[in-house]
Image: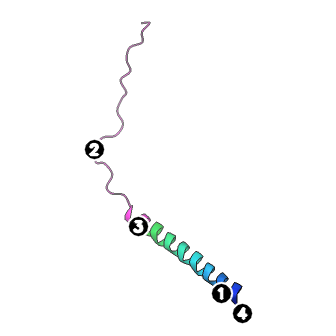
Amino acid sequence: MGGPTLRGVKLLRRILAAVLLAAAIAGSLRLRGTGGTPPQRGGWRQLQFPPEPGS
């Protein structure tokens, strides 16, 4: 009497709950991880190569 359909509804609820939980966690991590202020000093600098052995 409605056994398979009740199982199916329970399975769908569990799947939906898992997807919603994953979306909530991903959303909170995305909002929380907005970064910060980029470095105010630094940048590119010239590389110092060692002298070649044959020269």
Local packing at callout 1 (Cα closer than 10 Å; few below 14, some 14-19, many 20+) is: few
Lower sequence index among marks 3 and 2? 3
> Residue 31 shows which numbered tag?
3
Q: Residue at x 38, y 14 (%)?
A: 51
Lower sequence index among marks 1 and 2? 1
Q: Quadrant of residue 29?
A: bottom left
In this figure, which residue is indicated by the disc labeled 2? 41
Circle nearer the viewer, 2 or 4 = 4
Circle nearer the viewer, 3 or 2 = 3
In this figure, which residue is indicated by the disc labeled 4? 1
Q: Magenta stretch?
A: 29-55
Q: Residue at x 30, y 40 (%)?
A: 42
> Residue 6 shows which numbered tag?
1
Lower sequence index among marks 1 and 4? 4
**Secondary structure under badge 4?**
loop
**Quadrant that contains the N terminus:** bottom right
